[in-house]
Image (cartoon, rainbow, N blue to C red):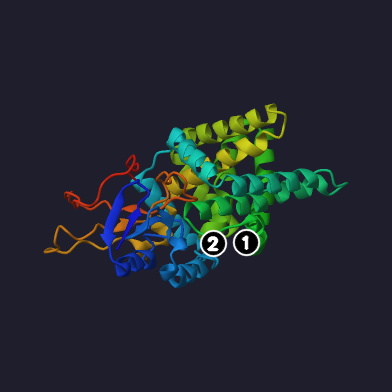
Amino acid sequence: MYKIIGADQREYGPVPVEQVRKWIAEGRANAQTKAWSEGSSEWKTLADFPEFADLLTAKGAVAQLPPPKIGALHADKLAAEIIARDYRVDIGDCFSRSWNLVRDNFWLLLGATAVALVIGTALGFVPVLGIPAAVFLALVFQGGLQWLFLKRVRGEPSDLGDVFAGFSLAFVPLLLAGIVVHVLVGIGLALCIVPGIYLIVAWRMFVPLLIVDKGLEFWPAMELSRKVVTKHWWQCFGLLLLAALVGLLGLLGCIVGIFFTMPIAVGATVYAYLDIFGAQQATNELLAPPTPEPGLTPASPPEPAPTESAPPVTGSTSSAPAPEMSPAPAPPPENNSPSGAPAPPA
């Protein structure tokens, strides 16, 4: 028998091995999910249990596949859906979750951010073509870095090589986006500054992730980002401004401090992307928990559902899936006891 800890820090179980395998197959548990087995004296990750190795390996291989491509019409539909349901950018919550993410994956995220910053800075010192290359490739590196952070949030395997994922997954769209964004933003800044600031917020934050994660071409991604961000432009501006200030604090700390503060800023932007664009719902609809059927006994264990917005378990390397929020509240089983603060509502 096994117990697992969801991202809301609650225990679920005990359940048999078949139930845990079912949760893994449905995406409600992953390799980083904390678990306890009968007869064990400590909590470990599911990756430490040999009986789940085959299934976790298969899920990891699927996670490495490039994201499915979606077209401009789908992007317009997604923009309309997001604007209709509305959203809210909780700046404090984004930075709080990012702090937990960086704390639990410190060396990986610090190293990845350092690689991206050092390469971008070094390009600027190349004679003649260095500065244009650094500017136009900025979104390529930003897309790879944010992709690495997004994979850690989702509990997927990642390494320093993901910093260069923008070159392998979507180099041409990211390059074109970098050229168009910087040219149009430059024109906007020249036309009395305000249009340029508007476009920086509308395009600079989320376009790379929309290209890499959603598989969009550069212009549909830019339009989707612009339409959605405009809905609550000031909230997004506040997030971007605070992220810039966090990075500036790192520069004031003997310059190298930026390697410690910038990962927090990047993580906050990734969490805002998930909150706004509903990446989980848009790409993983098949992973939604089934509606409970009448007649299910109260003793049946609740189904954990995937979530990106919950804080990770202390000592864990990534966020774990949280329990589903059923339409009708029901008392939890006697063996489900909270082990931490509840997850924020999606």
Q: What residue sits 47% from the left and 57% below the top?
A: 75
Residue kind at label 1, given as amino acid type: Ala
Count of labels in the image = 2
Q: Is residue 74 left or right of residue 144?
A: left
Residue situated in front as seen by the camera: 82 or 122: 122
The image quadrant of residue 16 is: bottom left
What is the three-letter code of the residue carrying label 2?
Gly
Q: x%, y% of residue 258? A: 66, 35
Q: Is residue 23 visible?
A: yes
Q: Is residue 186 left or right of residue 122?
A: left
Q: Is residue 155 left or right of residue 260?
A: left
- The residue identified by callout 2 is 215
In percent of width and height, residue 322 lies at: 34, 51
Check disc 1 and report its element: helix, strand or loop: loop
Q: Residue at x 46, y 34 (%)?
A: 91
User: Toward which corner of the image does residue 161 lie, by quadrant?
Assistant: bottom right
Residue at numbered disc 1: 170
Answer whether residue 220 is visible to the viewer in this image. Answer: no
The reply to whether discs 2 and 1 touch (Cβ–Cβ < 8 Å) is yes
Q: Residue 150's x, y, as percent? A: 52, 52
| Residue plotted at (51% across, 31% down) | 238
Label 2 crowding class (10 Å Cα cut-off): few <14, some 14-19, many 20+? some
Q: Is residue 252 above or below residue 37?
A: above
Query: x and y percent of residue 251 in the render?
Result: 69, 30
